[in-house]
Amino acid sequence: MLRNVQARNRVVISPMCQYSAQDGHVSDWHLVHLGKFAQGGAGVVFVEATAVAATGRITHGDTGIWDDGHVSSLRRIASFVKDQGAVPAIQLAHAGRKASMARPWYGNGPLTPDDLARGDAAWRIVAPTETPLGEGWIAPRALKKGDLEVLLNAYRQAARRAHAAGFDIVEIHAAHGYLLHTFLSPISNARSDEYGGSLENRMRFPLEVVRAVREAWPQDKPLFFRCSSIDDVEGGWSLEDTISLSKELKQKGVDVVDCSSGGILGSATAATKTTLPRVPGFQLPFSERVRKETGLKTMAVGLILDARQAEEALQGGRADLIAIGREALYDPNWPLHAARELGVDAEYARWPQQYGWWLTRRESALKKAGVRR
């Protein structure tokens, strides 16, 4: 139970961009993509990073929530997810200097003439400073104080629309080199005003966003915050910084910190050189420390592959929620299979009735045939 929202289990389907929206509008692809995870037994199902402003999209294919016209199709998804027994959730995002880039399967980098030929033209982007992500990337316009007020209102309106669409959880995306992360990290924030320099100043705008969303979001619904626990780059954002930030988030009404890592340099989905070994559960130490040192609930994500690994993390106090991403793409029924692996659903009672009825009879036939599974 988080505030007044009850999930049937602690498995969360992590936001995973599909880069398949049209002018921000979700389609049947998104309905089926997310709906099968709700059918698959997850407790919470997140819609992907959803832009609070058209210029805050990563690609032309990103989902959006910057206009009231986006609400009806999102409501269809939230309603179906809820009808299948899961909690519908949505991640609010702004890509910052990683906006206006190519879809992953078209290069996952700066837009090219080939993208323009496909109709994906570049647009002006914004960031804390004018420093681009790297050579060949678009140089952003540095945000002024008036711009920050416009963005705060965009987040407020996005939260209002998320509630109107029927979502029960919102998450603020402040990880992976996107806008709010670039305010937090000393790698990307070289501002000389009250929004740059000291840790307190670099946290200022992300915390203002939290305050704006929390005020616009119903008090009986939980608010999540995704951060990169470390930049994994020398001189970058550290775990100690994340703990300091999390203490502030707790004071401002955040219920869960979603502990990811990296992404300050290079695209969020590309393989980049890092010092943190990508082994199963590699980000669990981050969620464990944040949880123990702040008293906030945490969500662990990153190469959590099987049920016993997830259960051990929960029972060991390393996280309160387990987020599954690409493993769910491989197996949309991961939560249902996890329940059987842990011995709590031998009779397929947790499966949709339309499936469970058939599977119990299949099980009986297999036993009679002497087949062990």
Image (cartoon, helix red, strand yellow):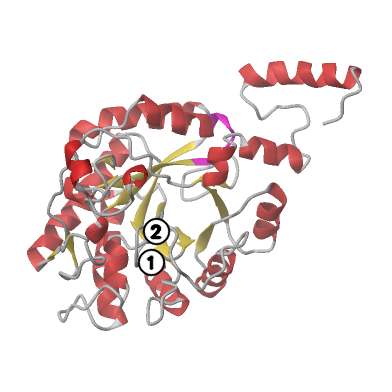
Q: Quadrant of the C terminus?
A: top right
Mark 1 surroundings within 10 Å by alpha-carbon count, few (fewer than 14), some (14 through 19), many (20 or more): many
In front here: 81 or 296?
81
Amino acid type, label 2 = Phe
What is the three-letter code of the residue carrying label 1? Leu
Depicted 99 relative to depicted 144: above or below: above
Is 360 displayed left or right of 142 in the figure? right
Magenta-drawn stretch contains 110? no
* Residue 124 or residue 172, whichever sits in front: 124
Residue 171, above or below 342: below
The residue at which mark 2 appears reads as: 225
Q: Which span of residues is magenta-colored? A: 38-44
Q: Which residue is mark 1?
A: 249
Examine the image and state in which quarter residue 369 appears: top right
- Contact flag, marks 1 and 2 (Cβ < 8 Å): yes
Q: Quadrant of residue 129?
A: bottom left
Residue 180 horizontal/vertical position (percent): 29, 63
Q: Mark 2 falls on what kind of element? A: strand
Q: Which residue: 35% across, 67% down?
A: 264
Q: Give left or right: position of 121 versus 301.
A: left
Q: Nearer the viewer, residue 26 or 91?
A: 26
Q: Position of residue 25 (x, y in %)?
A: 26, 32
User: In this view of the protein, can residue 211 be seen by the observer?
Assistant: no
Relative image position of residue 177 (x, y in whole percent) = 33, 63
